[in-house]
Image (cartoon, grey):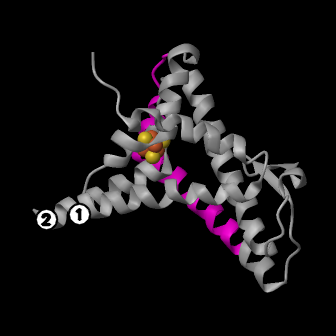
C-alpha cells in the first residue's frame, strides 16, 4: 500500500479555508497562496507540480467525488480550448473587476460593502464575518477574493457531481494558466 505523504491531506486545508470565511473574512487572504504558488511552481519548474501534488481543492473534489459523482464524461464542448480559454478570460475579467472595486474603496470613491457574491450575481450579506478593524480596502479585497474562491468551489462541486470528480480541473483558470506557462517555458528551452 502506498504510504501517504503530508500533501495527500491538503484537501483538509482547502475545506478549512472555506469554513474560516464564515468566521473572519480576513482569512480569505490566505487564498492568495493558491493563486501565487501554482504560477511560481510552473514558472520555476516548467511543470504542473502544483496540480499533480499540492492542490487541496483538486484533492477535495477527488475525495468527495468518490461518493457524490455520477462519473459521467463531460460534454465535449467543455473540453475544448475555446471553453477553457473563454472561462479563463471571463474569470480574470471578474477578478480584475474585484481588484478595481478594492481600489475604489481604497481611494474613497466607492462604499465598502460587506457582501459575498456567489456566481458573480447573488449577493449574500456577510457582515457577521467582518470582526476585525482593518482598513476597509483590506476587508473589501477579502470579501471579493472569498467570493471568487467560493464561486469556483461551487462550480467545481456542481461539475464534480454531474460529471467526473475532477472535472473542474479541465477548465480551472489556474490549471489553464499554469499549462500555458509550462508550454511557453518548455518551448523556450527546446
Ligand atoms: S487544475 Fe485547478 S483545481 Fe485542478 S489541480 Fe490544478 S489548480 Fe487545482
SS under mark 2? helix
What distance separates the C-alpha of mark 2 from that of mark 1?
A: 6 Å
Q: Secondary structure at mark 1?
A: helix
Q: Nearer the viewer, residue 163 or 165?
A: 165
In the rendered image, which residue does mark 1 sit on? Answer: 185
Tell me: residue 158, above or below residue 45: above
User: Dots 2 and 1: beta carbons under 8 Å?
Assistant: yes
Q: Residues within 10 Å of mark 2 (few under 14, many from 20)?
A: few
| Residue 189: mark in rendering | 2
* Residue 168 appears in the picture as rendered: no
- The quarter of the picture where residue 52 lies is top left
Residue at point 55%, 41% (across, down): 13
Residue 48 placement (x, y as % from top left): 31, 48
Q: Where's ligand 1: which quadrant?
A: top left
Q: Is residue 85 magenta?
A: yes
Query: Which residue occupies 86% across, 60% down?
Result: 114
Relative to residue 156, is residue 72 drawn left or right? left
In the rendered image, the vertical position of residue 146 relative to residue 13, given as above or below: below
**Residue placed at 52% from the left, 21% from the top?**
65
| Image side of residue 4 versus residue 157, left or right | left
Quadrant in the picture for the C terminus: bottom left
On the rendered image, what quadrant is the N terminus found in? top left
**Magenta-drawn stretch contains 72:** yes
The residue stretch that appears in magenta: 71-100
Residue situated in front as seen by the camera: 50 or 187? 50
At which x and y percent is residue 77?
47, 36
Amino acid at each position: 500500500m502506498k504510504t501517504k505523504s503530508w500533501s495527500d491531506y491538503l484537501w483538509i486545508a482547502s475545506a478549512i479555508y472555506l469554513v474560516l470565511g464564515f468566521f473572519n473574512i480576513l482569512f480569505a487572504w490566505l487564498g492568495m497562496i493558491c493563486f501565487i504558488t501554482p504560477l511560481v511552481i510552473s514558472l520555476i519548474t516548467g511543470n504542473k507540480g502544483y496540480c499533480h501534488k499540492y492542490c487541496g481543492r483538486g484533492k477535495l473534489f477527488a475525495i468527495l467525488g468518490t461518493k457524490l459523482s455520477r462519473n459521467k464524461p463531460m460534454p465535449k464542448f467543455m473540453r475544448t480550448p475555446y471553453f477553457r480559454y473563454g472561462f479563463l478570460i471571463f474569470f480574470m475579467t471578474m477578478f480584475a473587476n474585484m481588484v478595481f472595486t478594492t481600489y475604489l474603496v481604497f481611494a474613497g470613491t466607492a462604499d465598502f460593502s460587506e457582501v459575498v457574491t456567489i456566481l458573480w450575481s447573488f449577493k449574500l450579506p456577510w457582515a457577521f464575518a467582518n470582526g476585525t478593524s482593518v482598513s476597509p480596502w483590506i476587508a473589501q479585497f477579502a470579501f471579493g477574493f472569498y467570493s471568487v474562491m467560493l464561486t469556483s468551489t461551487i462550480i467545481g462541486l456542481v461539475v464534480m457531481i454531474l460529471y467526473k470528480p475532477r472535472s473542474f480541473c479541465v477548465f480551472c483558470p489556474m490549471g489553464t494558466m499554469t499549462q500555458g506557462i509550462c508550454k511557453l517555458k518548455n518551448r523556450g528551452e527546446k
